[in-house]
Structures are given as structure tokens and as C-alpha cells.
Amino acid sequence: MPGNRGIRMKMAFVVHSEYRTAQVMQLLKEVAIDYYTRWDQALGKGAGTEPHLGSGAFGSTNTVLMIAFEDEQALRLLIEHVRALNAETRRSDDKIRLFQLPLECIV
């Protein structure tokens, strides 16, 4: 992997309400992704969604997964599964968010 030349690597951040963590972890298992960094109790507010601030009226928090992909096929499969879960989700606030970025290097 020196320099990662010629590999079109990607990074994905998957953000979801903490109560969906078990479902998201099962999803990763189904698409054979066993590598990630996870932050629990992440605070924040998305555009047009309720805040997740961990206290008061907004007592819930989010979980964030950071996943580096050397194989774009694995990322495409994850995106397909997230879209399918979101299609079954009524409230916009309950949807899983996936943010994809280019990844220049893994050392």
C-alpha cells in the first residue's frame, strides 16, 4: 500500500441515532465490513432534523462510524443497503446518513 498509487480510495462517515446502532452493526456484518472506527454519544444537529444533544428535551445522541475503503465495491454495497433501510424509514430524523469523501492516503 505504499503511497496507494492508482487506488481510488474513499472514506465514509455513517451517522445514525444511537438507538439504531445494533441495526447498523448488523448491516455492516451483512455486507462483510468488519473494519471501522466508532464514536458513540456524538452530539449534533443535521439540516432539517431534530438536535441530538444528549440532554434535556433533546436527550438522544448519535453514533458515527468512520470507514476507509480501498475497494469501491464494498462502499457501493454499503450505500445500497443504507438506501434500502432508509426507504423503509418513515421519519427523516431516523434515517441513516452516509457521507462519502475521497481518501488520499492510509499509513
Image (tube, grey):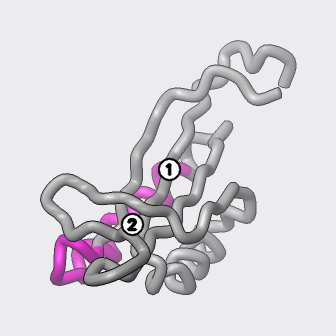
**Secondary structure of residue under mark 2:** helix
Rendered view: 22 above or below 2: below
Classify mark 1: helix, strand or loop. Answer: strand
Image coords of residue 38 (percent x, y): 65, 61
Image location of residue 101, percent across then percent down = 46, 33
Q: Amino acid at mark 2?
A: Val
* Magenta-highlighted residues: 75-94
Quadrant containing the N terminus in the rendered view: top right
Numbered marks: total: 2
Q: Which residue is mark 1?
A: 13
| Image x and y of residue 105, in percent | 70, 23
Which numbered dot is residue 82? 2
Left or right: residue 68 versus residue 77 is right
Residue 93 lies in quadrant:
bottom left
Q: Are marks 2 and 1 in contact (CB under 8 Å)?
A: no
Magenta span: predominant SS is helix
In whole angstroms, how far apart are the C-alphas of marks 2 and 1? 12 Å
Of pointers 2 and 1, the one earlier in the residue sequence: 1
